[in-house]
Image (spheres, rainbow, N blue to C red):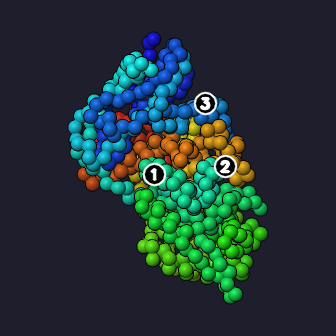
Amino acid sequence: MSITFKPINSMQRVLYAIEPTFEEKRATALKRMKYALQIAMYTDAHSYNLTVEAEGKLKDVITVYEQLPAPVTTIPQNIDEYYETTSPALVPDALIKHEKPFDLPPRQYRAVSVIFDITDKVKAGEYETVFNLKNEKGEVVASCSHTLTVKDVKLPDTDLVLTNWMHYDCIAQKHKVKLFGEEFYKVFASYLKVYTECGYNMLLTPLFTPPLDTKIGSERQTAQLIDVIKLKNGYDFDFSKFDKFIKFAKRNGIKYFELSHLFTQWGGNACPKIELNVGKSNQERIFGWDVPSTDIRYQDFLTAFIPKLIERLKKLGIDKCSYFHLTDEPNDKHIEKYTELREFTKALIGDMPTMDAMSHYEYYEKGLVDVPVPEIDVYKPFKENGVYPLFVYNCCNPSWGNYSNRFLSMPLHRTRIIGAQLYQTGVQGYLHWGYNFYNARLSVCEIDPYRVTDANAGFPSGDGFIVYPIKGGATHSLRSVAGFEAFDDYRILKYAEKVLGKEKVDGMLKDYGLEGYNAYAHSAQAHFDFMQKVISVL
């Protein structure tokens, strides 16, 4: 039996019918970062019960993952030349920890992912790791090696605010647990672990059921942290669940909190779903699609609630790192309504900041938002006019013009490039809407993310989630790995700025050909060479 077995750079997705050519035999890394690699395999004969084992001084900081296939079924309508496939296809994506033998089919390229966790405890030096492919008898049937040099440089924490919206109903649905119950938190701990491993440090926090991606007139499963009690004259609020959630999130690495939207998506025309406590087990919905956002009943509710919420934020010590949302993605048709909602809300929250995904500079110019979050293809007016702080986002758009994104149909390099772009554009934060959206578009039903990657043809494949559910929690994907590598690239460039000066780093980026979010060399090799060059001078 002859098996091809070789190390491949993490940015080259190992497609089943195409021989991978970006072989990587050595690299340099820094402390306090993760380093990713792949081992590609190919055989003419069907091979069974194989295992991959690492040998070397770094073996204790290595995790090996098998790569599972994901269907690419929806490609965006508007595309450009930098796609890996523009037709339906099957590509590797989900990463499952390698804990039992696997089979290798004939005449296909397959790969495992290898992640090195380079902590402070790893001593500087040059480390060769040998990867052995063994059969069921424990015999080595193929091997390869990779050399990783670890420099005595500790990367600082990021100064970016990074968020990817967590969908709590999807956790409950997939794992059959009661939202915010004891079993939920056991699963949630895994989702948060993977979330922070991805580099994210801000968490969407559901005061009430987030009014996101919900068909008008319908409901998503209740995800409400605030218990509402009706009094004779007004309301009272129990923050016990909210307190537990915030403390748990902080213990698990979350530093910033974005409070769920106070008004519905696409213009803020209605109220989020809010339920009233009626006894121990009964709930009564008091607000939703049927109540206009400017209804005096809802205004009275917010007038009672928001001061109590701010008092609680201060008690928890998170008032300086929390942000309010009004409505997601308002457009130029909504400016009158948005103005009204902003004026009402701002009178209640005072100096606390609002942030919303929006792509119209005139909203900011009119003083309607404190932290605007424009799409990456329209960030320039905000940047050129000195907006600070400025976050950016991408989602199902832009899919054209070579802009960075994370669709399954795109090269992994196109996902990873966002880190250098965030540095070069000098923004303060980055947002994406879909960490674990396991629903069809508008949440009309659940989907199985291992079989459906496009929200039932609602979004480009891969847009809705970057992690997959496993027993007891979540696991990474090839795209989430490209994402945390991107955020590590940002940290490396930031550190290089301290060592070399900003002018020098900007010059290196210019020589690399990077400008904004869509001008860069369409080459994983070029990106690898550039980042290794930066690391070499630290």
Identify the secondary structure beneath mark 2: loop
Identity, as a three-letter code, of the amino acid under mark 3:
Leu
Image vertical order of residue 404 relative to residue 9, above or below:
below
For marks 3 and 1, give the one nearer the viewer. Answer: 1
Give the class, few, some or many, for how many residues have Cα within 10 Å of label 3's Cα (few <14, many ≥20). Answer: some
Residue 268 visible here: no
Q: Residue at x 45, y 51 (%)?
A: 193
Q: Earlier in the sequence, mark 3 or mark 1?
A: 3
Looking at numbered disc 1 in the image, what kind of residue is underneath it?
A: Lys
Judge whether 451 appears above or below 323 on screen. Answer: above
Quadrant assignment for the C terminus = top left
Of labels 3 and 2, the one closer to you:
2
- Residue 523: x and y in percent read 45, 33
Q: Position of residue 75 (x, y in %)?
A: 64, 38
Name the residue that disc number 2 marks: 439
Q: Residue at x 51, y 51 (%)?
A: 191
Residue 379 rendering spot, x and y as whole percentages: 52, 56
Which numbered tag is attached to residue 90?
Answer: 3
